[in-house]
Image: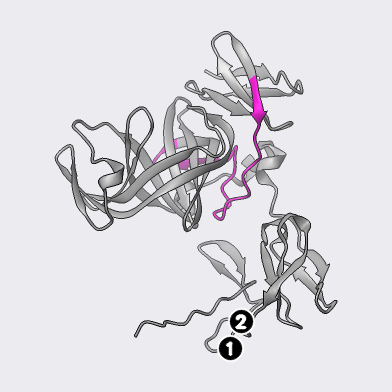
Amino acid sequence: MAYDIACPSCGAAATIRSPFAKMSVCTQCSSTLWLEKTGVAVGPKMSAPAPSISGLFLGAEGKLRESSFRVVGRVRYKYERGFWDEWLLLKDGDKAMWLSEDEGDLTLEKNYSFKGDVPKFEETKVEHLYKLSGHPFFVEERGVAVCESGEGELPFTIEPGEKVPYLEGRIDKRPATLEYDEDKPRLFLGSYVSMEQLSIDPDSKLSAPASAVKGPRDAVKLDCPGCGGTLELRCGEKTESIVCEYCQSQIDTREGKYRILGKILRAGPRTGTLRLGMKGTLRGTEWEIVGRLRYRDTTP
């Protein structure tokens, strides 16, 4: 059953919809709120995650397999290849579902109870087969994720910087993730879904927090410290470096401090059909090509 609270830090009102929420993040002042039996305690501020690739947002309402749901929380994790989001969906008002988003791909996950021992993380290897509750678990990816930030309501507490070892692979041809939590490993089995299958109600944006539906920062212009040429950071604050199109200087743009890292060789003749500045639509999301890397295989 939903209930209302007031942020002890700024006084902003909030509605807690999840019956199992242990924490929430204030949409006004970004304070972490611990939801305790005796009341609401204030924790450190939590930076809001950047907008997702899929376009999903906190407060989004939709329907999946005849069940209505609302997005009530999100945790963003960093890992070796980038980042992924874990969205908490409240189904039919009182049931939890997790939706994992990695590079725009969506996987509906369910916590699976299992018996027996699990392999020690330190002893696991990629492309190896392990047994979990009698089922073969083939490991395709192994790594340590780092919690970056969160928003909304969550059934557990998080702290930016905390590390979560994990294994990803398949059990009986289904996507599977094994997280090595400090208390007990958690196993999630999933199934792939699309944004179209989620049937997100576009009107739900009207009642969503403003911070949840804002787009990425507008493009930023700067003068190259090497030659003075005007450059444009199409990804705004997300850009960490840019190569000057006039003098080929690589410029560090982190924290708004522009300094030259060195000269970059031109990528060579442009082959193929893709070009910088090209725009298109992929899986319902608009894209623009803003950068390119060229690699050379030096294997004998």
Check the image and report above or below for 37 versus 118: above
Towards the viewer: 127 or 280: 127
Q: Can residue 242 be seen in this view?
A: yes
> Which residue matches tag 2?
275
Percent coordinates x, y for residue 164 in the rendering: 43, 40
Outermost residue to the top: 38
Residue at 66% over, 28% down? 44
Check the image and report above or below for 84 versus 42: below
Dot 2 and dot 1 residues touching (CB under 8 Å):
yes
Callout 2: SS: loop
- Image quarter for residue 247? bottom right
Residue 257's mark?
none
Please state the extent of the stretch shown in magenta in the rendering: 42-67
Towards the viewer: 281 or 157: 157
Check the image and report above or below for 42 versus 50: above
The tag earlier along the polypeptide, 2 or 1, is 1
- Image quarter for residue 15? top right
Hey, what amino acid is under mark 1? Answer: Arg
Q: Residues within 10 Å of mark 1 (few under 14, many from 20)?
A: few
The answer to whether residue 20 is left or right of residue 287 is: left
Percent coordinates x, y for residue 279 in the rendering: 63, 73
Hey, what amino acid is under mark 2? Answer: Arg
Q: Can residue 64 be seen in this view?
A: no
Residue 270's mark?
1
Q: How crowded is mark 2: few (under 14 residues within 10 Å), some or many (20 or more)?
A: some
